[in-house]
Image (spheres, rainbow, N blue to C red):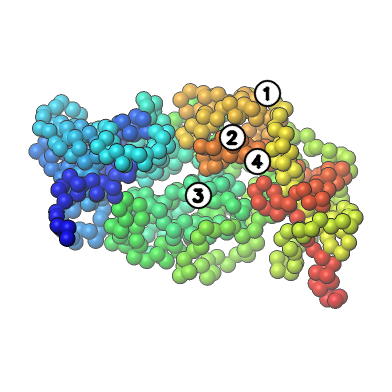
Amino acid sequence: MPDIRILDSHVADLIAAGEVVERPASVVKELMENAIDAGAKKVSVEIECGGMTLIRVTDDGCGIPADQLERAFVRHATSKLRTEYDLEAIGTLGFRGEALAAIAAVARIRVTSRTADAELGAVLKLEGGIAAMVEEAGCPLGTEMEVRDLFFNTPARLKFMKKDAAEGAAAFGMVQRIALAHPEVSVKFIRDSRQELLTPGDGQLQSAVYAVMGREFALGFMPVRGSGEDMTVTGFATLPTCCKGSRNYQHFFVNGRYIKSRTMTAAVEEAYANRKMVGKFPGCVIHLQTGLNKVDVNVHPAKTEVKFVDERQVFSAVYHAVMAALDGEKQHPAAVMDKPRPHDTVTPNQIKFNATPIPRPEPKAAPTSLPLHDFTAPKAAPVQSPVQKPVTPTPARTAPPTSVTWTPPAEKPAPKAALAPVVKPEPTPAPKADSVPAKAEVSEEPQEQPWKITGELFDTYIIVQQGQRALLIDKHAAHERMNFDRLKAEGYEPMVQQLLTPAVFTPAAQERQVLAENLPLLAKFGFEVEEFGAEALIVRQAPFDVDAAEVVNTLTELAAGLLTTGRADPAAARDHLLHTMACKAAIKGGWKSGPQELERVAKAVMDGSVKYCPHGRPVAIELTRKDLEKQFKRA
Ligand code: ADP
Ligand code: MG
């Protein structure tokens, strides 16, 4: 029978380290949280080699007295908690007294610190958890934690680390989230000697959002504000037209703590139901403030998940706040930040707000239907009658109403419009969704019968009649697919346009990085982009398929796509660019098309070569004669 033994403290610490210290990003998180708990107004985070060789966090907080420096690294040593009762209302980010011990066990540490009442500071070095002597040191008020050679003594863990670039990106993501969580703290991030982020720390959430997410992104935000029983909700969320391709842009905070919350995610997405494109996700930065006793933060090792005493209250508060912002958005245009002028050097503290929406003349490309949720709102959530409004898709503020003739922007010659102006049908009320028994896709077998085009609806849907059935073809979706297949087979050889005024823009740091990494690929697609100063990019040339006014938006879109799909996979990155260019080069819903163009698109669908657009939406729906006869009670 094996002996039961008490693990020696070093081994015990390593086990705890598995929980708290997974990778450089988790070290960054713990050290930054300690700095904020210490009342810092400024926190600087510096990393080298993705944080594997160095993480240095410097703060101007209260400091650690010399005689307690060593004790801070003892397991379960904390200044934040005394009795078990304190656990019921935790107001600090840390509380377990484990982080420093766990980090010290797997790295080489040098900490320097000085409190306000000490003339001299103190320095302590630790290696693998073993402390040397505390020595006197001259240093500014506050604390500097230097963590070197993470996992140097745990090769097994070292094996699990990703490339430095990936670890660095995760650490940066952590810094950004904490910066968004604490707009009152000025957060600086330096990677391999290059400063990548500086928030002003002026206490304004929008300043932090601006610094972290970039000006282009912030342009698409509307403010969110609301309150529920014993809680307030503040923050920003994307305009329905500016939703994103993934959930990466959703950030939730509770009492200054970054958290993942299915309830809050569901509440936000529920509010956007019917207002955004299928497969798009709202971005948001949502802060919830509530009583310390309304939330239990002691349920997750990394403290990123919390338990609310009443999840339904949280759902309701967030849902209604976002809903109110969306509803109010049409009457009171959202506060949007000034559009940058080329060569502007605006610092984050100079953000201005104005009340004019920025027009985005963008015809709606495809019918909106119910969004796909990965997870649905909790059943208990109070969604019964959130707002007594029709749930028909709300046309986006800047999209043209379907019954009005929309002319393409002047820069783009309306292609082939003159060939044969199609008579616009009189606006008719949209049929109720359940009254049209439409099948969502075209029958599988190619039908040999002859077909003909009998008209076009709303300059968007081609009507094709074939035997006893009719098809409505979404001309944009179908044409996009045709383009994509052709580009994929033949490669993209762009016609390029020199921009009259080169476009200078400041994307979010991660977006800038991914674009900078892909400059050669972008050049192949006709975008001549260069780095411009430390934060901006300049575009001098773009493919002709992209409107000059859309160049920056397109690049931002490309960056977001590259971040989610194509980062590590060149083929996926190339496909992503092909998708985007196929879409940009496609005829748009709402544009007038000549008969040959309609014919070409219809033919591709009818001969079966095109079934779905590259985003997976159907390109056509089918109505049979029987369906219609049933509707008219002829059968
Ligand atoms: P916890 O944060 O859960 O208390 P840690 O192991 O992270 O545990 O830190 C232990 C203690 O060290 C803290 O309670 C705090 O008193 C002190 N400490 C750590 N970092 C700092 C800092 N940057 N400034 C001041 N005190 C600090
Ligand atoms: Mg801590």
Question: How crowded is the residue under tag 3: few (<14 C-alpha within 10 Å), some, or many (20+)?
Answer: some
Tell me the residue at 67%/46% (across/down).
614
The numbered mark, 4 or 2, whose residue comes first in the sequence reads 2
The amino acid type found where label 3 is placed reads: Arg
Q: Which residue is disc 2 drawn over? A: 555
Q: Nearer the viewer's eye, disc 1 or disc 4?
A: 4
222 displayed left or right of 200: right
Question: How crowded is the residue under tag 1: few (<14 C-alpha within 10 Å), some, or many (20+)?
Answer: some
Circle 4: element type: helix
Gap in angstroms between the C-alphas marked 4 and 3? 20 Å
Q: Which residue is disc 1 drawn over? A: 498
The residue lying toward the viewer, choosing from 142 and 56, is: 56
Quadrant showing the N terminus? bottom left
The amino acid type found where label 1 is placed reads: Gln
The residue lying toward the viewer, choosing from 377 and 62, is: 377
Gap in angstroms between the C-alphas marked 4 and 2? 13 Å
The residue lying toward the viewer, choosing from 403 and 258, is: 258
Are circles 3 and 1 on residues that touch, CB within 8 Å?
Answer: no
The numbered mark, 2 or 1, whose residue comes first in the sequence reads 1
Gap in angstroms between the C-alphas marked 1 and 4? 22 Å
Tell me the residue at 75%/67% (across/down).
436
* Disc 2 within 8 angstroms of ligand 1 (CB): no
